[in-house]
Image (tube, rainbow, N blue to C red):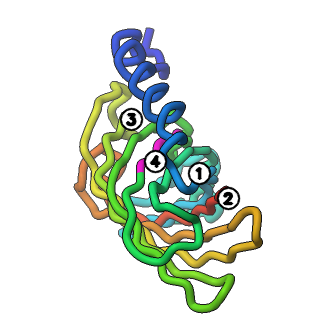
Amino acid sequence: MDSQLPKVKILAVSCPLLIFIFFLSPCFAGEVDVDMFGLTYHLQKSGAVRKAPLKLDDAGYVVFNPGLGLGYDFRDDRQTNGLSATIHGGMFENCDNHPYSFVAAGGRYRKYFNKNTFFETNLMEALTYGNDTDDKHYKLAPTPYVNIGLGHDYGKFSMTYYLSFIPKDSGGDITSSTAMLFLSAALSF
């Protein structure tokens, strides 16, 4: 039987690591992000997923990929400009509606334009766990991850909208046939 669930051995290793990262790290974080994943745009025609269950166009270039993640920004204060270390992790449905999970670490640069509006960019290296459309077996793979975001600070929280880029053949089998753009948002406290 071909199960879409991760193998027990991988869960036994990854669950304690995720618990350590996500439940102990907030003690040191200046900002906690709740990531909401949403849309994927396939940049090459050969990478379109025509059979995607949640495609938003006939060709399968644009696909809805729901998911949630959690991240931590280790800056002193959410309203501080400059560089900071970040970690993120999450899970979303890939274009074939199979779970795709990741943990990532890297840096974030944030610059406020005025008192409440800011620009930021994240550059991270992710360890992904997923499968390709043609291969139902899950595997771990390193994947580079970069995004740019525009956000607004509402006082007690901020909201940031991101455009992310994943290069073709960058790892994780999710990009074996195309480079992709992701649209997502983060609610930060």
User: Pointer 4: what residue?
Assistant: 88
Whole-angstrom CA distance, mark 1 to mark 3, is 25 Å
Quick check: 87 above or below 147?
above
Amino acid on which disc 1 is placed: Val
User: Of residues 187 and 165, which is closer to you in this image?
Assistant: 187
Q: Earlier in the sequence, mark 2 or mark 1?
A: 1
State yes or no: residue 115 in magenta: no
The reply, left or right, for residue 167 in relation to residue 50 is left
Foreground tag (2 vs 1): 1
User: Of residues 187 and 139, which is closer to you in this image?
Assistant: 187
User: Pointer 3: what residue?
Assistant: 130
Bounds of the magenta span? 87-91
> In the structure shown, which secondary structural element does the residue marked by tag 2 occupy?
strand
Amino acid on which disc 3 is placed: Gly
Quadrant (top left, top right, bottom left, bottom right) of the C terminus: bottom right
User: Pointer 2: what residue?
Assistant: 187
Q: Is residue 128 visible?
A: yes
Whole-angstrom CA distance, mark 3 to mark 4, is 17 Å
